[in-house]
Amino acid sequence: MPEANGKTTPGNSNEAFGVLETTGWTPAMVALDDMEKAAKIRVWQVELNDFLGTCIKVLGPVDAVRTAIDRGTRVAEQMQGDPKSRVIPRLSSEAVAGVVSRVEFNPLIQQNVVKEPPGADMPDSNTSGPVQALGFIETQGFTAVFEAVDTACKAAQVEVVGKEKLGGGYVTIVIRGDVAAVRAAIDAAGPAVSGLGNLIAAHVIARPSESVLSLLPQ
């Protein structure tokens, strides 16, 4: 099986490639969590663009990838992420060079825009123990997200994990804690955005999947 950037890529008839592209970081992560819980897949890369988009690339057996992409697409649709998706049962070896991207740091937004999760046997450096729940607050505009996260942290005992930025002013702040605390924090955060910016998403993931944890912003 060929390698690209040190990562396994599709290379035999038993390996399928799936892609799910959404608007916004939160719909993508919620979809990915559901995808991993629905079928045995591996996340190849997650790539951001400068037009609000998040692209998830996954590998696995054909049936598993189809199941995962179908589930992820439905979740993203429910979250108004305007998803685009495709399953390719066997990606051409010549096409791999056009699909894979090198890990890339964007100095404008001060973060990686191409992300590769660590291997399944690697611990997550962002967590000091099991994560019961993650909360996502995504807005268009910094003022709105700052007010929302302050409200969230005052409403319940939660911890800020980090901040993810997309183009178009989309900003996501991720929090963690026990399920009840994260739900209370997110419930309080949503209304705080009113009049300060656009609320894109406010969502809770209970028992987040391994890849979602590995992709948490710093």
Image (cartoon, helix red, strand yellow):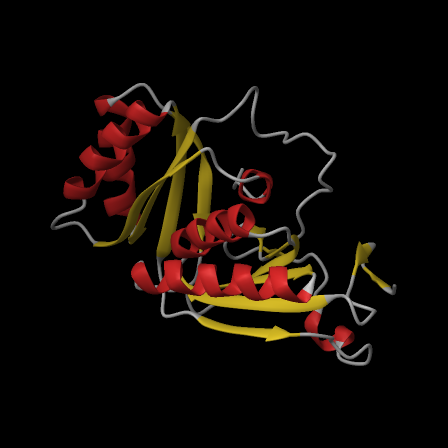
Which quadrant of the view contains residue 62? bottom right
Q: Which residue is drawn at 77% across and 66% down?
A: 14
Is 165 displayed left or right of 111 in the figure?
A: left
Q: Give the camera-side residue of 198 and 63.
A: 63
* Screen quadrant of the N terminus: bottom right
Is 193 displayed left or right of 66 in the figure?
A: left
Q: Residue at x 65, y 57 (%)?
A: 45
Q: Where is residue 158 in the image (x, y as percent from the top left)?
A: 35, 23
Q: In this view, does 87 lie above or below 187?
A: below
Q: Where is residue 37 in the image (x, y as percent from the top left)?
A: 52, 46
Furthest residue toward left: 195
Is 214 displayed left or right of 52 in the figure?
A: right
Q: In this view, does 60 lie above or below 201?
A: below
Which quadrant of the view contains residue 218? top right
Q: Position of residue 181 (x, y in %)?
A: 30, 23
Q: Give the camera-side residue of 62 and 177.
A: 62
Q: Residue at x 80, y 57 (%)?
A: 8
Marker count (numbered):
0
Furthest residue toward front: 63
Q: Is residue 5 above or below residue 17?
A: above
Q: In this orientation, does residue 115 appear?
A: yes
Which quadrant of the view contains residue 200? bottom left
Q: Where is residue 164 in the image (x, y as percent from the top left)?
A: 46, 47
Q: In this orientation, does residue 53 appear?
A: no
